[in-house]
Structure formats: C-alpha cells, structure tokens
Image: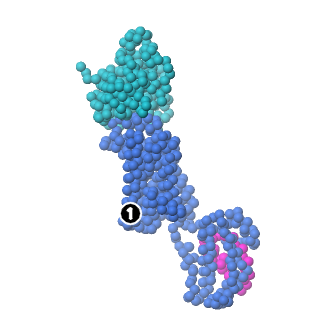
Amino acid sequence: MNKPAIVIEHLTKRYEDVTAVDSLSLMVEKGELFGLLGPNGAGKTTVINILCGLTKPTDGTAKVGDYDVQKEGGKVKDMIGVCPQETAVYPYLTGAENVELFGNLQSMDKETLKKRRDMLLEKMGLTQDSKRKAEKYSGGMKRRLSLILALIHDPQVAFLDEPTVAMDPQSRHAVWDFIRELKKEGKTIVLTTHYMEEAEALCDRVGIIDHGKLIALGSPKDLTSKGRVTNLEEIFIKLTGRRIREEI
Amino acid sequence: MKLQRVIALTKKEMKKTVREPAVLFMIFLFPIVFVFAFGSAFSGGGQPIYNIGVVNMDQGNSVNASQMLLTALSDTKILNLQMYSDNQTAQNDLSQGSIQAVMIVPPDFSQSFASYQTAPNEPGTWTNATVALYLDKGSIVATQAIPPIIQQVLTAIAGQNQQAPAIPFHLEIASLIEVKVPSALDFIAPGMFTFASIFLIMMVAQSFTQDRENGMMKRIRVTPTTPTEFMASQVISYMGIALIQATIVFVMMYAMGFRPQVGIPAYVFAFILVLLFSLSNVGFGLITATIAKSSGAATGLSFLFVLPQLFLGTFVGASLSSGAQVAGRFVPSYYVTDALTSLFLRGAAITSLAILLDATIVTVFCVAILAVGIILYGKYFRI
C-alpha cells in the first residue's frame, strides 16, 4: 500500500481568541486530488499555510511526504508547489521572466527550465504574451501565470488555493484540464475552492471544514448520496448553513 | 547557499529598479537632478559676485582717492560696482534685492586719504572720514562677506602709497581672492557623494512592504530559498544600485567642475566607503519595513531615517549649529562625509588616522544597523 502524501494529526492553530484550525486530522493519499472546502474563514488557507511551512501550528503535527513540516521544512519545500490565494506575480517582470525566476529559485537546470517554461506557458495559453510585463495581463492571465509559478519545478505535491477564482469559463476549463493532467501524472493535489461544481468535477475526495473542524469527508458522490441531495453545493449549505461569513 | 537563487533574485531586483518609473526616478534621476541643481547653484568660477551700489560724494581734487578705491574694489572680481547719483535710488534697489549693498563714499574721503599720506604716523593730524555701508539684511552671505572685503580694500589702498614698512601691505588679501580657491561645489561634493544612496532607505522599505502586501514574500518563502540567500540577494542588489548612484553623482560633479587632486586609490576608497554606507541604508530600510504596515506608510516612515542622515551627515550638516554637528556623530553618513572631505579636500592619505578611524566607525555602524534590520524584520515578518 502506498504511503500517504499528507498526514495531519490533531492540527490546531489559535490566534489570540480565535481558533482557526481546531484539532484537525486528515490524510491525503499519494496521487489523490483532494478538495478542501469551507465557507470564508473556515480555516482552509490556514491549513495550507501550515502544510507549506508559512504558519506554525499551535498544536498537532503535519507531514508532507514523510517530512514533518515544522522540523524538516526545507525538505518539504523541495517537493511542494504552492499557488496562493492572492494573484502573486511580479508585475514588472514579463510572464517568462516570472517563470524563470521561480524555476531558478527551485534550482532547476537551464535546459529543463526552458522546456518546462515553454510547455506550461503553452498549456496556459500565455505563449503569445510571455514577453509582456505581467502588469499588462488581465486578471485571468495573472491567475494562470501564478499557477505556472507554482508548478514550474514539477512538484510532487501541489497546493492550489482557489486557483480559478475570477477566471472566465474558458480559462477555468483550461486550468481544470491542466489539473486533471497533473493527476494523471501521479501528482498529489490539494485544492481549495468556493466553486462546488469545480470540486465535484475534479476531486477524488473532499473535506468540508467549518470553524476549523472537519465536518464531512468523502468523495463528492458519497457525500451527496449520504446527504440525500443532488449536488455538492446542497450538502455544503446543509452542513455549513446559510449565514453569510466574512473572513477577517 | 545556492548562487543560482541569489543571482536570480538579484537580477529580479535590478530589473525592478530600471523598469518601475517611480523607483527609477528616486534611485537614479533624483540624484542627477539634485546634483545638477546644487552643482549649478554652487559652481561657476569659485566665488560668487556681489552687486554693490556706490554713491560717490567725494570732492577730492588733487588726489582722487575714491577713484582708487573703486578701481581696487572692481579689481577684486568679487564685487560688481553700480554707480548711483543719489542714495535714495540706491536704497530702493537695495530694498528690492537687485543689489546686495550700498556704499556711500563721503565728501571728505580724498581729504582724509591725503591727510593720512602726509603724516601716516601722526593719527592726531588725520581728517577722519566714514564710509557708510548698507547691507541686504535678507542675505546672510552678503552681510558676512561684503564688509571684510571692503575693509580689506580700504586698508590695501592706504598701504599702496605707503612707503613705511611698518604699515603692512594688504595686497596679499586682494591676491588671495584671485588665486584658485576651492569652490562651493568642492565643499559640498563629499556630502553629495554620501547623499547619493540615502534614498535607498525608502526604496528598501517600499520594496519589502510591497512584496509583503502583494503576497510575493509569502511566495518566495514557500520555495527552498533560504533567508540567507534572500537577504544576500537584497544586499548585493542595493549595493549595486548604490555603486551606480555614486558613479552617476561623481560623473555629474566631475562634469560640473569637481576635480579633487587625488589619485585612483582615493577614488576606489571613496567608492568602497559609499558601498559600506549603503549597508546601513538597507538596514534602516528593513527597520522601516518592520514598523510600517503598508508601502504607503513605509514611504513616510522612511523619512525618520532619511532626514537625520541627510541633514546631520551630508553637505547640509556643515552649515548647521554646533549642537546639530554633535548630533551628526550619531549617524553613519557623518563619518562617510568626514572621511571623503579628508580625502578629497584636506588631501589626507587613505592610511591617515582620521580616515581609518572614520572608515572603522562607518563599518561598525553599518554592519550593526544592517544586522539589526535583518533581525527585526526576520522576527516580525519571517523571511
């Protein structure tokens, strides 16, 4: 049996009087496309930040590919790719320069970097604009570029935090196809999204968290059938309620 | 430490510097404009020229002493004499700032001069005359500079016709004015050299806060890039920028007439000092970025460090009060300017005690400030 790619045990993160993640335990298999769902402020991004070493947990442990994220952060960073929620690209660099920079930060050799750069720019439909400064890109183009930056080094585990937010349907489907390809290549992907149809279309399993706690876990099909609803959105609303949440 | 990452981040920082108009202006164009403006104001022949209005009421006949005085004053090349027929018109021009002083030569000036010549050792027989001088009180330079010049010329013309060796010839005073003396540009040049990189404080603070705001710092942190690699790239980038700034300022000043009589080692030493100084500016920038919550706040807060460095430690400091000059000893720019002044103007050797002491203090100061900046930033915003 394959070892799991991600193991989270009793993970807790408290910020003064707020508990963002509350004793969360979870396992993601190698090669699995796992969706982390939840309303605003549920703790999804905090979990991802802990897994990629950006945030220290208050309690509990998290391992990525057998490495403890706190004790062996360097090794974890070698195997992960992170596409953050913010559209984080350097505006004064061209698309290609942004990609090259992050390839170099991942210590890629020149030849491989060039090949991966060209291939990813092509897949994300950015070849034509690769020599333009990123500040000239549309929001959707920046998101696609941000995704390339996360995946340029062909990581084993990818954390994609709302990768398709603010994208038009064409761009979104291009990204979906790309994510499916990654899965076919055996990559482990953790995806957070507010689009339930996206999670339904892509994810092998989803975990719904609210107030930092895991409140549902299973394949989209299992969850909908157990909840006696027709789609993931309905079960999501059923579990998390209709009250509007704001992330502070 | 992987050189590939350091080089990649350094290249990125340099591209930012040349591609962002605001950064480009602040880093490169601002020093050019600044040097040009100050250089133009303080260069040009080494000495300023003062316009003096003269009302000559002298009634000398046999000896025209007033004409000798006016000729001698013109010969100084510092004073541009404008003749007025009456005091009122001259006073009007003085009040409007078109001349810096009005000199009234009294009716008995020649008579007084003649009495002195007849009996130079018998003051009791002299006819006393008073040359009245009205000064532009709005010009500190005029009030300080013009009276001694006229006094020297008066003494000199009295001495010119004097045979007795007991009366000193004050012609050396006049000749002193004619020899090449350091221009105002020469005096401010060391401070301007120091000034060149001070605005790095603002650039570093803005860069770090912007990268934090737009998520780029976070993005870098999830790569295998180590804090040492990241900071090394930043320090190298900004030292490179400081070097370019110092070169631009130097070329500008050279073009405007700054010609220190020193050899190549002195120039190399000067650039090394400026590079060392840039470390403190990176450090202050990091401290600012630690305090500031946004890039906008960083711009304002950076002046907390920019202004003391500018006013207490560069060319501005020399004209400040003694108290301010003592305060200057607590900013690194003071020691850079002092060392460069010793090097370029005082002709001190690189190995002289004064320069080595300044260089040591600059090194200790700058490394300490950079270390504090890195530690503080690392503590509150992990790199």
Indicate the position of residue B328 as horizontal and vertical percent values: 47, 59
- Magenta segment boundaries in residue numbering: B52-80
Q: Which chain is blue?
A: B
Front residue of A100/A40: it is A40
Whether residue A95 is visible here, answered yes or no, is: no
Q: Which chain is cyan?
A: A
Residue type indicated by callout 1: Leu
Quarter of the figure that contains the N terminus of chain A: top left
Neighbour class for label 1 at 10 Å: few (<14), some, many (≥20)?
some
Which residue is located at x 45 percent, y 57 percent? B331
Residue B77 shown in magenta: yes
Q: Give above or below for A54 relative to B276.
A: above
Residue B369 shown in magenta: no
Q: Which residue is mark 1?
A: B357
The chain under label 1 reads B
Residue A216's image quarter? Answer: top left
Q: Give above or below for A190 relative to B331.
A: above
Q: Give above or below for B17 relative to B155.
A: above
Indicate the position of residue B37 as horizontal and vertical percent values: 56, 56
